[in-house]
Amino acid sequence: MYRAVLVDDEKYDLEGLRQLIPWNDLQIEVVCSESRPFAALSYIDNHSIDILVTDIKMPVLTGLELSRKALERNPHLKTIFISGYQDFEYAKEALHLKADGYLLKPVDDDEIVELLKKVVNEIELERKSIQEQSQFTETFAFIKKDFVQHLLEGSINHETLPTFLERYPLASPTGFASAVIIELDDVLWKNKQAPDAWQEQLRTASDLIISYIEEQKLGAWCELSTSQFAFIYQDTPERLEDALADLNQHIHRNTQFTITASYGDPVAFPEEISQSFIQAKELIGNKMFLGKNRVIPPRLAKLQIVKDAKDLNSILDAMFVAIAGYDLVKICDCMDDLFDNVRGFEHPVKVYSFSIHIATKLEAHLSTVNETFESLLGWGFEHLDVIREFETVDDIKSWLRKTSFEISERLFMKKQSKSRRLIEPIEQYIHSRLAEDITLREIANKFSYSPNHMGYLFKEQTGESFNEYLVRNRMEKAKELLLEPKYKIYEVADQVGYKSLAYFSRLFREHYGFTPGDYRKQG
């Protein structure tokens, strides 16, 4: 519904305008009709409206002055002037104010209905344009933060991709490109050996990688994590491998780190770059089997050892999802699948290395949600040395399963506590404004969320959608107010956000099974 204010110092004309026009059919709600211009202005100052229909010639405050002040508060306001004076100066000033319509008294009903239809259509088009622009801006801002990463991950809609590529040109001279991943080796172990110097060394190594990529013009890059980077390469594989080997020496000379790098096959750019990125991720995930401090090219994907490693990584990914989702049964299943690989190992040292590898992967996964073993369990990475004290595979698996359970539970409890803390001030804000015309988008903007995330948060924490929550609380407040004899029913409706008494009564009946009047009689 669109909100309209009617103003005319001649009460007969005002009442005729209010009664004879089919406002509801036009999807317009007359929220205020006033014969006193200053009273109308006071209402406009404190409420959001869409349409102002006003007489031009009024004492004290003319319709033109009223419109001018209203437009200062709401530049998008639609204004229709009505006048009994065929005065060109009034019409000229009305046009100067960008009036949306100018009618002469006596007003023809059909004429004003057609004019109101035109105004409503203009408002609808403007709102649609604003909404589309807002949606595009939100999407653009989301991807702009790390355009290259989203391009590699294939999370950019193909229809909007040309728009982003126009903003961020990444043209390939050959029409083909490869995804490349660079990972710093032994990041967690270096932290254990020299925790004080680790952060500085990590920053130095990261800066060297970024500078080298930019200076050698290897391609557009992004940071996947604190120890992993990716870029889009558009030259020959031979030059790439030489450049990566040179970068590795450069990093090793200036820091305590080495690097392992992988790259996918050249593919059509930009349409298939995400496929090359998937291949590069699979290859870098096989570092445990293929070795570190080296370049892993696509040709090694044909080796059987890589096929086995790919299966292992899939199990690890599924286990991390289960840990994050507090799915204890799935954690057990994944742990069993992981340790099925251990049965064929030839030496206990391989079992220990394999188990520590799982734990280091878990630590790396926790870093993506800003957590560590220390933040969740209170122990440092050196605690993993306990793995070497176990004498059987079952003992190691039991310890890892118990640790995963505990991490999963801590993550779940933190998530629950955080969400509850987030929703409480939002609920308080809504309760304090039940009489106002509040929307999900308004609440989301107020608390710096997207409307979709805000809707999800409500459903998760209250078990209701935003609209269900708002209506329920308004109805509960209405029940309290109806027990106070000093309030008339239409005043109760107004205090819980409903300007239409009929609409309020219908909602109340749907909610409780009887009308507000019947409820008051029972009370």
Image (cartoon, grey):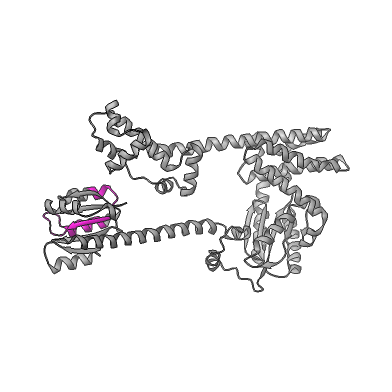
Q: Observer-nearest residue: 150 or 125?
A: 125
Q: Is residue 425 above or below residue 36?
A: above
Q: Observer-nearest residue: 55 or 205?
A: 55
Q: Return the x and y of residue 158 as percentages of the image width and height.
A: 57, 63
Considering every residue shown, the one lying at the far right of the view is 346
Q: Return the x and y of residue 207 as percentages of the image width and height.
A: 64, 57
Which residues, given as a range, are shown in magenta?
43-71
Which image quadrant: the C terminus? top left
| Total numbered circles | 0
Q: Which residue: 28% across, 28% down?
A: 483
Instruction: Please identify the quarter of the rendering in which residue 91 is found.
Output: bottom left
Instruction: Please identify the quarter of the rendering in which residue 403 is found.
Output: top right
Can residue 355 be seen? no
Q: Is residue 517 above or below residue 454?
A: above
Looking at the image, residue 289 sits to the left or right of residue 159; the answer is: right
Looking at the image, residue 104 sits to the left or right of residue 309; the answer is: left
Can residue 481 be seen? yes
Q: Observer-nearest residue: 325 or 222?
A: 325
Q: Return the x and y of residue 304 as percentages of the image width and height.
A: 82, 55
Q: Observer-nearest residue: 118 or 247?
A: 118
Q: Return the x and y of residue 504 as percentages of the image width and height.
A: 31, 40
Considering every residue shown, the one lying at the far top of the view is 523
Looking at the image, residue 284 sits to the left or right of residue 342; the answer is: left
Considering every residue shown, the one lying at the far front of the view is 513
Q: Is residue 223 magenta?
A: no
Q: Is residue 46 magenta?
A: yes
Looking at the image, residue 418 sits to the left or right of residue 287; the answer is: left
